[in-house]
Image (tube, grey):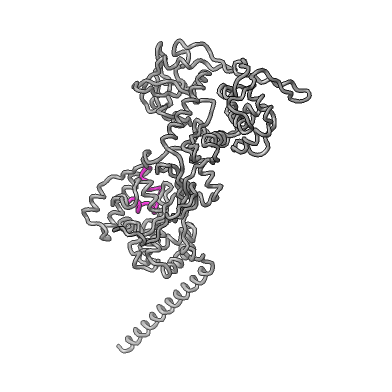
Amino acid sequence: MCAAMKWIMKFLAWVVACITLAALCGFVGVGLIFAHYNKDLPSFEKLAEYSPPVVTRLYAGDGRLLAEYAKEKRIFVPLSAIPLLVQQAFLAAEDKNFYEHKGIDFMGTLRAVRENITNYGSGRSMVGGSTITQQVVKNFLLTSEKSVERKIKEAILAYRISQVYTKNQILELYLNQIYLGRGSYGVAAAALNYFDKPLNELLVEEAALLAALPKAPNSYNPRTNYQGALVRRNYVLSRMQEDNYLTPEAAQRANSSPILIHERSENEMASADFFAEEVRRKLADMYGSNVLYEGGLTVKTTVNPDMQTNADKALRASLTAYDRRYGYRGAKAKLPSVANWEVDFPARAEEMSVPLFDGQMLAVVLEVLRDKAVIGLSDGTKASIPLSELLWARKDLPNLGVGPQIRQPSDVLAVGDVIIAKPIKDKKELYGLAQIPEINGAMVVMDPHTGRVFAMSGGYSFSGSEFNRATQAKRQPGSAFKPIVYLTALENGFTPATILNDSPIEISQGPGLPMWRPQNYGGSFLGAITLRTGLEKSRNTLTVRLAQMLGISRIINVAKRLGVYEGKVPKNYSMVLGASETTLMKMVTAYSIIANGGRRVKEAMIERIDDRDGTILFRRDDRQCVGCQVPAGSLDINA
């Protein structure tokens, strides 16, 4: 018996020695691993200077959102402004022991290992078991590479960070950095993109959906995988209930609610594509692309959305009316058969890139009758185009010619033609024929006293061409330049009552070139008339004769002072009739100076720019307001 006890004691001592040796080896092994991977770890001190890329926003003059520019759509929100409900949803979904562990949840890691072993070979994705702190490390300091080495580095850094930063600081970094799908970075941007709400208005089920997304933002997108998103959201709700963040009743109500995605209301946004693009270019020139796309600027512009809408419509209407004078250029495409158009045509229309406005739709001609054409619209409904709406569509011929008059719809349309149809106001199911103008143009609306640009239309369609014909296109101003010639005359002793001779004139163009003989519109001459009458009737010959008396250099000098031209301008007499090129914006600015009594006006599209912290970077009105800044406590509100 005694010998047996001795053997047992020796065996136990041997087991303890083996365990101790194994533990010592494990400790040494962990130390060696730590020492190996601790060498090249990135510094986490930059987390203290966290300044994430934030979206730059442009606002119209009435406060509506005009445009957003960002590499990552993010709105930084301090943790104190993030509702507790949202924080709890993410903690329940991602890291229930966040406030207890030191950056690494060993029990959570063991659970993840067990689940991965269970799921091995099932086709399911592996569970990471990463804490929120580890996710912060991965997003800020490491890559998304799936490897043992990265996980070890991640764990080491997570432990270190948890010793330096508070839990609230780490959670704030996480909730503002995490990607949540649909181009949304951070919870504030996601709340707007998914629900068109600020964070403090989110319902329980909405907060749970956001918390469901970090695991796989694209896979759980409710627009493309509604059922998967619903299951994952309800899982988060169950976790919130288990962690006592929700009562069973609240969890049940949220669990039974459908996922409702709300797009941003069009009424809350202003549309001014050419204007916004021009402002974007100005901001890039002023601050550089990095600040523009990452700096979180708040830019208040001068655009008036109502004026912009009217300017766009007026320009399109004018271009369309001009274009119609020169006939119809034919269908956009041709369907070989209309037998199954309800299925075939909507898909075909979806593929066609055609700018459409004011209710216009792509349509296919189904039947051509004696007094109308029956059409199928891209939404699957039927309508008709009466003969009266086709009379303008004479065939477009070379050299600005048009074909014979239209007597029946078959003169214009044929079955299978894919056309643009525009609804006729107050006439249900009746449409007119439309086409995209070949000609283009621009319009600028400016306050002549301040230079504030209220509207800018740079062409028929921004989607069709982003080239801004108001600021980028150099064109001959034509007779619009003549007032500058007459202004030069007034500066040099002429008066509106000065008599000049409107008669034929010829000017030598140089050796070997024919004489230049400018003509008036209509070919007539009025003889002796006043300067005022010459301007009112836009007489070419009188303007050229006046330029001879003044000298081209004086006229060019005035034009440069008004900002119409810069640099060298050809000194020829055709320029006084508007032959030298300039931009529409420069001409509008010049006319504004004249309307402003000669006081200088510079076009302004930006009222004010604030940085992400609310510091004013730029202000259009740079006048000093003496006494505007009143020291705190200097006013008696009870006085």
The location of residue 629, given as percent across then percent down, is: 42, 56
Task: Decide: is 230 above or below 87.
Answer: above
Comparing 154 with 313, the one in front is 313
Determine if residue 610 is in view.
yes
- Residue sitting farthest toward the bottom: 2
Q: How would you classify the magenta stretch by its main secondary structure?
A: loop
Q: Report the quarter where the C terminus lies.
A: bottom left
Q: How many marks?
A: 0
Q: Report the quarter where the N terminus lies.
A: bottom left
Residue 215 in magenta stretch:
yes
Which of the 4 image quarters holds residue 111? bottom left
Task: Decide: is 148 above or below 279.
Answer: below
Range shown magenta: 208-223
Residue 402 in magenta stretch:
no
The location of residue 98, given as percent across then percent down, is: 35, 64
Please name the residue shown 40% across and 78% down the image. 19
Which of the 4 image quarters holds residue 76? bottom left
Determine if residue 122 is in view.
no
Please name the residue shown 27% across and 59% down the image. 245
Task: Decide: is 617 above or below 60.
Answer: below
Task: Decide: is 467 above or below 84.
Answer: above
Comparing 544 with 87, the one in front is 544
Comparing 1 with 359, the one in front is 359
